[in-house]
Image (cartoon, grey):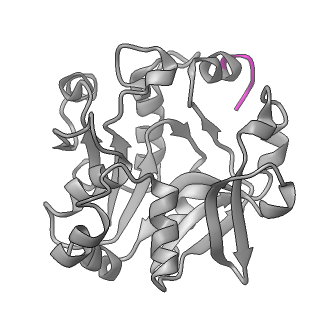
Amino acid sequence: MKVVILCAGKGVRTGLNYPKCLHKLNEGESLLERNLKVIKKAGFKNKQIILATGFKSQLIKRKTKNKYVYVYNKFYNTTNMVFTLYNVIKKFKPSNYIVIYADIIFDLKSLLKIKNTKYEISTLVDKEWLKKWKKRKDYMNDLEELKISKNKIVNLGKKTHRLSKIDGRFVGISKFSKKIIARLTEESFYSKLLKKNNKIDFTNFLMILIKQGYRVDAIKRKVDWFEFDQKEDFVSFEKKTF
């Protein structure tokens, strides 16, 4: 099994001139360092951890002392997370993959939970997300639909202002089986999905898979996590205990 951390983006809304995963938190370690510690506690070795880089990739390599596997997306400026992921998986033999956003922090128990699942495709869903979101300014403007039926996700990703359309919050940690990864790397799949749409985001990617008949299982639990989307999120995090 491999872990991919998607850290190719520029994070424009943070106003930083370096990858936001390198931003130091109040404990003195960077967001990326913190996540790598959790990933290693979950039993992953350095050679199993892939940093999918783009913007200032050499800085990420230097800050992580070149300890891991690095895959560079030279098209990071014009593509999105899914293309960055595809850029990784096409370089290796199919394997089970856990895919993690670089701009979140998360707890060990949740990572272990999804690591040990046997589903073909699964994604972490925070069932107590609303308590966190209500602390945000104008939180109603940052709501996304996510509906679950019998543990299966049936809709996600669309903007909504109706809480009735939200059964949980997409966290940004998903798992794909070796069989699914093999399908995703087929040239026919790439041609249909990414060749003409290389800016597709991750939730829309999962929704496309669902519409094509793939089952995406929700790992629904209380997840201790925090998302850093813009500059104000770092300030907010500094004022609370995660």
Quarter location, residue 25: top right
Q: Quadrant of the N terminus?
A: bottom left
Report whether 194 appears left or right of 141. Answer: left
Q: Is residue 10 visible?
A: yes
Instruction: Decide: is 217 above or below 63.
Output: below
Q: Main secondary structure of the magenta part?
A: loop
Furthest-front residue in this view: 196
List x then y, in percent, for residue 68.
22, 42
- The residue that appears at 60% across and 47% down in the rendered structure is 107
Along the line of sight, which residue is nearer the eye, 18 or 161? Answer: 161
Give the left or right position of residue 86, taking residue 128 as reference: left
Image position, residue 21 (x, y; %): 42, 29
Query: Foreground residue, 64 or 6?
Result: 6
Residue drawn at x 27%, y 33% as measured from the top left: 77
Q: Nearer the viewer, residue 81 or 3?
A: 81
Residue ID at (77%, 49%): 129
The reply, left or right, for residue 106 in relation to residue 24 is: right
For residue 76, above or below residue 92: above
- At 43% from the left and 39% from the top, the residue drawn is 102
Asked whether residue 45 is in view, the answer is no
Question: Residue 240 falls in which quadrant of the image?
Answer: top right
Residue 39 drawn in magenta:
no
Please tell me which residue lies in front, 75 or 132: 75
Q: Position of residue 52 (x, y in %)?
A: 27, 44
Whether 121 is drawn above or below 33: the answer is below
What x and y, as percent, mark residue 105? 56, 38
Write the start and end of the magenta stretch as one range: 238-242
Q: Is residue 190 above or below residue 103?
A: below
Task: Give residue 176's quadrant in the image.
Answer: bottom left
